[in-house]
Amino acid sequence: MNVLFINIKELIQVREHSVDFISGKDMNVLPTIKNAFLLVENGFIADFGLMEHCPNIAIKTIDASGRMILPSWCDSHTHLVYSGNREDEFVARINGLSYAEIAEKGGGILNSAKKLQETSEEDLYNESKIRLEEIIQLGTGAVEIKSGYGLTKDAELKMLRVIKKLKENYSVAIKATFLGAHAIPAAYKNHKSGYLQMLIDDMLPIIAKEKLADFIDIFCETGYFSVKDTAQILKAGQKHGLRGKIHVNQFTAIGGVEVAVQNKALSVDHLEEMRTEDIEALKNTKTMPVALPSCSYFLSIPYAPARKMINAGLPLALATDYNPGSTPSGNMNFVVATACIKMKMTPEEAINAATINGAYAMNLQEKVGSITKGKLANLILTKKINSYNFIPYSFGNHQIESVFLKGNEIKKA
Ligand code: NIG
Ligand code: FE
């Protein structure tokens, strides 16, 4: 699709040269061009600059007067393929049960797994695509989706095939992650090592052969999988070319961050509980810390200590964690606002975290995440706003007038 945007009040997240990710103090710098144009050719960003240098060409032109353009949100952590919902557990938590107590009673991840096992691939696809379409309208232009609510060979493969079908049918960029080690299924209750071995011996070779996943994940947490299990899964993934993106330090800090770094994981996600040594382990590495503030909000657990991490020179990405248990929301606008309000990130830091750093956490930094020539024209056109600070300021709302994927406007269904 070819289109020329003119009179853009402010073009946000402009990077002349592609960067991998932004860390530390640099996160507080958000490069922009005021009164700009943006040229899209064949779905890619072909040119941009000041209006006074705008080319005079006869193609479809959109006048963006008073409005801003930024790269689409990059949501590097979701579980949006799932079956049914868990609002009954939500009410149980309001009435005093904890997330852990609900899980012990057979709720939680095992509850979602039971529902998913009983759902056909077609129904699962149809349920999930509604959520995908919804987050596209909320400005997400690249998303990672995990398995992990199957917990049997058939059901995990069903989830991964649904993700593959979403990839084929939608122009949003999608990456898939194999999270077989999300919980220990009832059939393996006292035989965790057998379950892990099944994932590694029976499932990984099929997943690799059919190219059903880009990454591998494990829930490294007290009561779920240990640091040793995490090392085993990360190493098994490496053998099949799958880098780790792991759930770690959500409720307890048990050393998973260090093991993730040692095994060159692409990202470590959650990080609500961060010790000094976890921050140290991440310094000068290629592992992206990912915070999930809407999970903290929904479960009323601590927020990842963004200030501590950024002040220590680390990069940080923001993602939703969209899932039926801990975060039934895929709204990156809320994530960005909550990061500013609750984690004291500046709007510049939050926007960097939700775009270029999120892209890196999916290994998509060369395709999306900034306004850079050659990247996909996955874009957010805002409503008329005074400054980009209004985006997080207007929390619970969004400032999106329209969204574009590969230069095509995506109209509401
Ligand atoms: O990222 N923590 C592990 N997994 C999900 C929640 C799973 C669930 O409750 O269904 C998360 O928060
Ligand atoms: Fe998650």
Image (cartoon, helix red, strand yellow):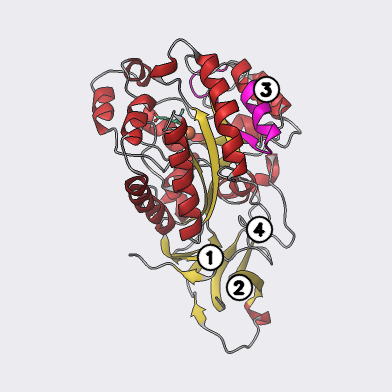
**Does the residue tagged 2 have its C-beta within 8 Å of any atom of ligand 2?**
no
Disc 2 vs disc 1: Cβ atoms closer than 8 Å? Answer: yes
In percent of the image, x 38 and y 52: which residue is there?
129
> What's the distance in space between the residues labelled 3 and 4, CA to CA?
35 Å
Tell me the kind of residue under disc 4. Answer: Pro
Q: Which residue is mark 2?
A: 36
Q: Which residue is mark 4?
A: 31
Tell me the kind of residue under disc 2. Answer: Ala
Point out the stretch of residues depicted in magenta: 231-253
Task: Identify the mark nearer the N-term, 2 or 4.
Answer: 4
Q: Which residue is mark 3?
A: 259
Task: Identify the mark nearer the N-term, 3 or 2.
Answer: 2
Disc 1 vs disc 4: Cβ atoms closer than 8 Å? Answer: no
In percent of the image, x 56 and y 85: which residue is there?
59
In percent of the image, x 40 and y 37: which residue is there?
323
Quadrant holding the N terminus: bottom right
> What's the distance in space between the residues labelled 1 and 3, CA to CA?
39 Å
Q: Which residue is mark 1?
A: 69
Magenta segment includes 251: yes
